[in-house]
Image (tube, rainbow, N blue to C red):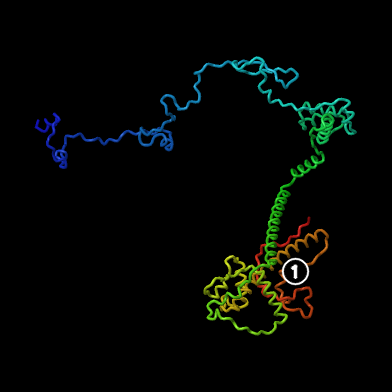
Amino acid sequence: MNTADAQDILGWNATPKDEGILPIGGLTDVDRKKRSNRAEAHFKRPEGMHRELFNLLAQDSEKNLAALIPSTTKNLGYRNQKARIGMRQVRPWVWKPFENPARVDGLQLCHWQRVDKIEAGAPYPFARFNKVINIPTFTDDEYDKHLKSLKWSKEDTLHLFDLCTRFDLRWPIIVDRWEGSTRRTMEEMKERFYNAVNELNSSRDPSAELLCYDAEHEKRRKEQLIKQWNRTPQEIEEEEMLIAEMRKIEVRKRERERKAQDLQKLITASDRTPTTPANTSSALSPAAGVKKKSVIRPKASTANIAHSASTSFIAEHSSLRFPEFRSAGAHLRSQEMKLPTNVGQKKLKNIETVIEKLKLDLVPVGAEEIVVGYNEFRSSIVLLQELKHALQTAEYELESLRTRYQAATGKTFEIEPRMRVSSMGDSSMFGEDKEGTNSGLPSSTRTITDMIELSSSLPQAVSVSL
């Protein structure tokens, strides 16, 4: 034994050696017992067991075996036990007779009941569900004064009240058990009973609340239910189609009313500002502050006066509001020709279509007169589109009224071509009618109106026989 071993045994601090150097004996130790590489035993799959089932029970070794019974407590199975039989004393039950207070014939029945819950003189526990309807009775004098009727005898009336008392106003049973002198319907029995009860209550207490029953209404209701029940699948499908079509008509009607109100506001507006200010286009002009000389112009003709009046009407009632430059400072006159941002795509398309067909410039020269006229021209296009749409709506309503008139009277009714939007494309309608061959047609020029396109949102009128 060397000194290092002795110090190690005695627990003394020996001189530390270089732990980074591996001794040669650790590499050439042939006496060390080698680890066995023998494969561990596997759980063998029993014969006749499918491979999928075996994989659920055992995967690679016995330690991975799945539990066949789920258990979290040893020898007790489930953690939460549902019942532990035999842990308490058995409660005795007895076969005991009882009587139901609802029966007045002395019927006695029996049932099982726990001994500890038996109480002497206790009522039947289900007797509280016995609800009795108070059916009034009447004497001979009351019948002679208030209940006498030509359609009902006294015996039938007594028999009716007796059945109502016995069967608690269960009318199908009362009708089935009726044995009167005359065969009665359920509506007749109800009407007789409720009228008699109202007469008795009124005679005994004038402030009593009366019962309401309408036999005719009940008959009509049952007839309607029978008709509804006897409908064929074709009739049900047709009714659903008519209901869907009625809803569409209501939606289109509300839409037309809304558009008519908007158009009325557009036409009757009288406090609009001018489309383009007359004194705001002097920007970038060297003589902006110089007073212009007065120019003597010839008197306007009647046609010019009418044109100026129509121009002022369009400028006053147009829905386009071009930008105005009221603040001080210079600006480009071409900025006054920019369309507002609230203009719809359909209006923009119609404006471009009319300008292209008339071979005009989309961006003309920014002279003052050109800017004013160009803005008024585009406002006129938008106003014509609104008026044409209103005419289309009126034509649809007129066509619907014509169809209803023909279906009701059987007479024909023709709509004049001047009231139809489709007649605007006729070339014979343009210009003045000098020879009188186009009587009844409008004589104003409508070339631009014919260029404007409308969306086909209004359906065609369909003739329906009501």
- Residues 132 and 341: in front is 341
- Residues 335 and 390: in front is 335
Q: Quadrant of residue 355?
A: bottom right
- The amino acid marked with disc number 1 is Met
The crowding category of the residue bearing disc 1, from other C-alpha atoms within 10 Å (few below 14, some 14 to 19, many at least 20), is some
Quadrant where the image shows the N terminus:
top left
Residue assigned mark 1: 419
What is the x, y in percent for residue 97?
67, 16
Q: Secondary structure at mark 1?
A: helix
Query: Where 313 falls versus 53 (above or below)?
Result: below
What is the x, y in percent for residue 128?
68, 24
Instruction: Please state if 162 lies on the left or on the right of 259 as rendered.
Output: right
What is the x, y in percent for residue 302?
73, 80
Quadrant where the image shows the C terminus:
bottom right
- Residues 438 and 339: in front is 339
Q: Residue furthest left?
A: 2
What is the x, y in percent for residue 81?
48, 25
- Residues 311 and 152: in front is 311
Q: Quadrant of residue 205?
A: top right
Identify the residue at image location x=74%, y=46%: 231
Identify the residue at image location x=27%, y=35%: 38
Q: Quadrant of residue 380?
A: bottom right
